[in-house]
Amino acid sequence: MRRLIDGVAHRLIEFIAALPDQPAADAGGGDAVRALLDEPPPEEGTPPARALDLLFSKVVPCSLETAGPGYLAYIPGGGLFTAALGEFAAAIVNRYVGVFAAAPGAAELEAQVIRWMAELLGMSPSAFGVLTTGGSMSTLMAVIAAREKILGDDTNRGTVYVSTEVHHVVTRAARIAGIAARQIRIVPADAAGRLKTEALRDIIAADRTMGFKPFFVCGSAGTVNSGAVDPLHEIADIAREGGLWFHVDGAYGAMFRLVPELAPVLAGMERCDSLAADPHKGLFLAYGTGLLLVRDQADLRRAFEGGAAYLPPMQEDGRRVDFCELSPELSRDWRGLRLWLPFKLHGVAAFRAALAEKRELAVLAHERLAAEPDVEIPAPPALSLFAFRQVPKGLDPARADDHNRDLLGRINAPRRILITGTEIDGDFYLRFCVLHLRTHRERVEEGLAIIARELERGRRPS
Ligand SMILES: *Cc1c(COP(=O)(O)O)cnc(C)c1O
């Protein structure tokens, strides 16, 4: 065991040490990897060194460098080492946290982590929740909990409200939860990407007169297009007046609540019925850990409880949690340890500082780009993400999208940073998103120098 662990540890430490020099993206070789992996199921074992060679020299490198400092694309996260150790330890001790009676110690640790998160995110002391696999699952569970609470079995006239800027997993969750497309309303957003609350009121009122039953509204605490934070207090008011469930999609942005100066930006988030946050983004964990918090635990229980004769009895004492009664999962990994261990080892202060750093880097990047004469930015970063595009003087507006797609390609070509694009109001934009564990000032400066050079090139007639 020690030899195997040492062998893996050696490769992993080499991997981490080499990250600053790795290409920001090298995802083109999928077919070659398939050919290398194509073999019958291996009846006999392989020497560890050979298996690890294949893994680390061929399979792992064929990828966007999602563990490296140049990853400014989509929504970055990281791959925090101490969280990975927690995950490793959890897999070895293999505790069963689905049912309290099977591992009270592990279940209590996970419950404590969830209470910590509720407190750190400003939720009321009674709030509780579940660690999920990610924002998609958290959102699906939230829609189902809302449906069960407000609509019961009578789902045909229930309507859902999201903005044009909402992440597609929210509308997808509604569809999976049995809400038909004709029951989903897309509310317009303002120029900064924030849901228009007057329009929301009007659409809800119109639906009521037509006999629909409005039951679910989603506000975004950080949209994926431009990083906008919806007017959460106003949405909370509308939800409260109308008896709707108020869900906040904080998969990208909620963790910035840990930075005291940013708490006002997210004000109102704490009034939600449910909040989806993603430790695998904003707390820098490896992919696979999401968080759903609800104001009232009973809302999850109503939707997901259910015991069976072949299971240990479920707990009567409300302080003891059978996680299988709060989510659709029964057997699953012990997710709590991968958050508990880093919190204990580094302290929450380290996370606050890291999030504040990402925010400052995004502000810096925005300042630089806003100073360019022909760069358009719909809104400065509310948190750590903003969109931008170049419209050089004299460019035919019909060519603006092509110009910016080309700009994106040239910025990414040296493979020192990777940024991605999106569409806002039908126009193509580039996005700059700082949330990676390993992204520090040096790499942001290097990326900005590349961008400045390519903007300059974009001004020359081609
Ligand atoms: C990433 C993201 C999601 C989806 O979450 P997953 O963890 O990828 O399932 C939803 N909403 C927003 C705003 C996101 O950034």
Image (spheres, rainbow, N blue to C red):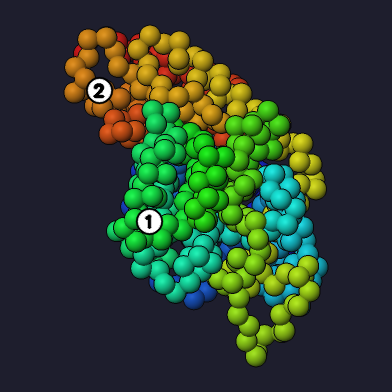
User: Considering the numbered disc 2 on the image, is that residue within a helix, a strand or a loop?
Assistant: helix
Some atom of ligand 1 lies within 8 Å of the CB belonging to the residue at label 2: no
* Residue 457 image point, x, y percent: 32, 13
User: Considering the numbered disc 1 on the image, is that residue within a helix, a strand or a loop?
Assistant: helix
Q: Nearer the viewer, residue 29 or 134?
A: 134
Which residue is rendered at x = 59% and y = 50% of the image?
272
Quadrant for residue 3, please give it.
bottom right
Q: Which residue is mark 2?
A: 400
Quadrant for residue 69, please give it.
top right
Which residue is rendered at x = 26% and y = 27% of the image?
401
- Amino acid at circle 2: Ala
**Image-based side of 165 in relation to 97, left or right:** left
1 or 2: mark nearer the eye: 1
Q: Is residue 50 above or below residue 343?
A: below
* Residue 21 image point, x, y percent: 54, 31
Which residue is rendered at x = 40% and y = 14% of the image?
453
Residues at marks 1 and 2, CA–CA distance in whole angstroms:
42 Å
The quarter in which the C terminus is drawn is top left
Label placed on residue 76: none
Q: Which residue is mark 1?
A: 208
**Image-based side of 44 in relation to 124, left or right:** left
Residue farthest toward the front in the current orientation of the protein: 209
Q: Residues within 10 Å of mark 2 (few under 14, many from 20)?
A: some
Q: Is residue 87 above or below residue 277?
A: below
- Amino acid at circle 1: Arg
* Residue 74 image point, x, y percent: 45, 39
Which residue is rendered at x = 69% and y = 58% of the image?
128
Dot 1 or dot 2: first in sequence order is: 1
Q: Nearer the viewer, residue 35 or 237?
A: 237
**Image-based side of 421 in relation to 116, left or right:** left
* Residue 71 image point, x, y percent: 50, 35
Q: Nearer the viewer, residue 159 or 306?
A: 159
